[in-house]
Amino acid sequence: MIAGLSPEEWIVLTLSLKVSLVAVTVSLPICFCIAWMLARWHFPGKLLVDALVHLPLVLPPVVTGWLLLLLFGMNGLIGRWLSDVFGVTLLFRWTGAALAAAIMAVPLMVRAIRLSIEAIDRRLESAAATLGASRLRIFLTISLPLALPGVLAAVVLGFARSLGEFGATITFVSDVPGETRTLPIAIYAAMQMPDGEPIVTRFAILSILLSLGALIVSEILVRRIARGGRHVI
Amino acid sequence: MSFDIDVKQTRSGRPITLFCRTDSPLVALVGPSGVGKTSILNMVAGITSPDQGHIIVAGQTLFDSDTGIDLKTARRQVGYVFQDRRLFPHLRVRANLAYGRRAAMSMDMDDVLAFLGIGHLLDRWPHSLSGGEAQRVAIGRALLSGPRFLLLDEPLSSIDRDRKAGILDAIDQIRRRSPIPILYVTHDVAEAERLSALIVTMHEED
């Protein structure tokens, strides 16, 4: 127990961190691939893919949660397949909360990574090619390091967004204490209680501290990377 | 034969052509700005492809539209010193120099550091270098990649007069130490004459 948190509150905090970390970790490679595709490739239907990726940003979160229910619920197309083949169910589970958080974080993460990929000076990649580097080596040693500040920004934005995720999560996996009751859901639950004000206050302060901490860590990391120099000489 | 180049490329509706067959180890492409000199270097490096023609350097066919040969840039073993240098901003000078190094084929690192006078710059970041220092590092990086030929794109541009002589001396030294062909782009004929290069003049195409 830290900072006067009760065991129940401690469970809410660790669950929120777990859900957010898993959501960001699992979605990061996917977001990078989507961002790369949108930044570098030209293909028919690119506009549609772009719109679909950003859809959770503008849809009411409840609608996103409802769509997740349709797809990943017990009778959903993917939900039934996961259950039949792997014996896995996401409904009312923390893994479902992580999926909802990831879906809601994807637009922000893709956007941050895409901007950093678009900002890479392509002339540096052609310079690396003249030095005998393969496409994989160019990606690993030039493109990826130069995109790193954007990737870090995406991680922090995604983490903060996941920590704050409420609508899609409560619609998809409901409020199950110890399993899906993350910080925002716990705050909402406490607000429904007649004597829940102190709990709401503590959780609200905790949320603010976590989000601030994430932003400060990200800023420090980005500055440390930028110190190496970003100008093309 | 050092260079056997016969290419045509149309960019934004403007034709760029070059015909050059020579045994001269140092060829200077001269001509006004915008005539397509850098485009020719990019074609020789494989960064862009000609619409038609062939590029043979030091006996190796790099591009031939008739036979469909078009070697990838990474396989051409080119040492390209860009006009804008293109040092990697996230790597220190040491890592920039080592980026393309082919140990078995490269010039000796200490030798290159000494004659370019860049040994004291190894731990610096590219953005902290002056124009002349950055240019010498770019030349060193190209030499250390073990190139079969060198492409130098206006290596004296944006360098003050005092530093120009140093870079020209370095190019002179490269020529004496290494037998690889050099294609040198400049808009200054005097510069090409100073290097005793074979001068090929490019003109605007109609």
Image: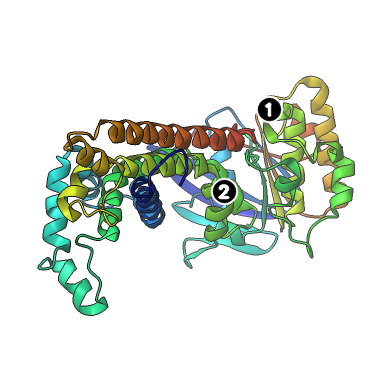
Query: How was this image coloured?
Result: rainbow
Chain ID of residue with mark 2: A
Q: Position of residue A166 (x, y in %)?
A: 23, 43
- Amino acid type, residue under disc 1 in the picture: Ser
Q: Nearer the viewer, residue B66 or A85?
A: A85
Q: Tell me: B194 left or right of A167.
A: right
Name which quarter of the figure residue B170 lies in.
Answer: top right
Q: Nearer the viewer, residue A225 or A101?
A: A101
At 40% from the left and 35% from the top, the residue drawn is: A211
- Amino acid type, residue under disc 2 in the picture: Ile
- The reply to whether discs 2 and 1 touch (Cβ–Cβ < 8 Å) is no
Q: Marks 2 and 1: same chain?
A: no
Q: Which residue is mark 1?
A: B157
Q: Residue furthest top?
A: B161
SS label for mark 2 = helix
Q: Is residue A117 visible?
A: no
At 67% from the left and 43% from the top, the residue drawn is: B91
At 22% from the left and 72% from the top, the residue drawn is: A82
